[in-house]
Image: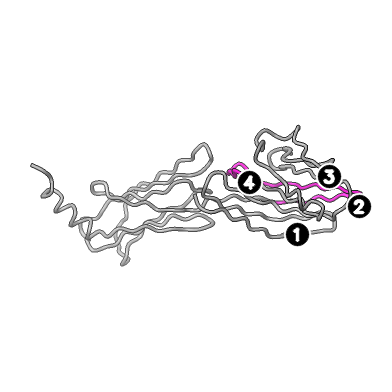
Amino acid sequence: LSELRCIVIIISSSDQQRAACCQCLFVRVFDSCILPCSFQSGADPVIHWIQVTAGHLLVHSFYHNQDQLGLQDQFFRGRTSLFKDQISRGNASLQLTGVEVQDQGRYKCHTSTMRGNKDSLINLRVDAPVSKVNMEQVGNRIICSSEGIYPEPDLTWSTRPPSNLNLQNQTSIQQTEQQLYNISSSLILSDSETDLIYICTISTRSNSRRGHLNSLTLFLFQRIQPMLEPL
């Protein structure tokens, strides 16, 4: 997992409602993301954050000049906060910590003052990009793997220079309790061509990374390894 970014794009708007897209890329547990919301400042502001996708779960409430968390859904307990010093200036943005895949979906920010009410919709998309590609040799195979990815990644093999080899491989994908994906692929080395660089590419919608091993180095290592074994 790597640094987290939140990218906000207004995708539609009206006088009463706005829909925005917020994308969070994370690589460490307990990273945070800010869901934007603004309103016309006024006396006695009321702020309610609701996760619409999961069945209108109450994420955070603020009124009477303080947080009101008695009815907050347990899933968000201890993970939400507002920018209290900026509420008077019309900032109702929510900071969500410990971002998980399960947090993604549509959120509604409801604000109310003596000047009127406003609802804003924010679509939160969470991505865990490919942070590292691991490659190792096991016997006559090359193993390529990566962990902690979301959404489900793609894995492809290639060579440099390009060849007509049938790159026989077996790829497996597992999903963790956190809904992140671990991927691993095993490729059988060719005995006929020993001057290729084998390239493994793992991709998601947010990024892609490559790993590579030189088959000539692997071939020579296999030949000299018995000579290095103790008697």
Label 4, residues with CA under 10 Å away: few <14, some 14-19, many ≥20:
some
In this rendering, the label closer to the viewer, 1 or 2: 2
Residue 210 percent coordinates (x, y): 40, 58
Q: Indicate the amino acid at tag 3.
A: Val
Marks 2 and 4, the one that precedes in the sequence: 4
Q: Is residue 75 above or below residue 169?
A: above
- The quarter of the rendered structure image containing the C terminus is top left
Please give the range of residues in magenta.
97-122
Q: Nearer the viewer, mark 1 or mark 4?
A: 4
> x, y (%) of residue 30?
57, 44
Q: Where is mark 1, residue-wise? A: 12
C-alpha span from label 1 to label 4: 19 Å
Of badges 1 and 3, the one in the foreground is 3
Viewer-proximal residue, 53 or 57?
57
Q: Is residue 55 above or below residue 216?
A: above
The answer for how far apart the CA atoms under marks 1 and 2 are is 23 Å
As drawn, which residue projects farthest toward the front?
85
Q: Main secondary structure of the magenta part?
A: strand
Residue at x 34%, y 52% (from the top left corner): 135
Dot placed on the residue nearer the N-terminal end, 1 or 3: 1
Q: Are marks 1 and 4 in contact (CB under 8 Å)?
A: no
Which secondary structure lies at badge 1? Answer: strand
The alpha-carbon separation of the residues under discs 4 and 3 comes to 24 Å
Image-based side of 14 in relation to 5, left or right: right
Mark 3 surroundings within 10 Å by alpha-carbon count, few (fewer than 14), some (14 through 19), many (20 or more): many
> How much space separates mark 2 and mark 4, taking CA atoms?
31 Å
Location of mark 4 (residue): 104
Q: Which residue is mark 2?
A: 115
Crowd class of label 1 (few under 14; some 14 to 19; many from 20; radius 10 Å): few
- Mark 3 or 2 closer to N-term? 3
The residue at which mark 3 appears reads as: 46
Q: How is the image coloured?
A: one colour
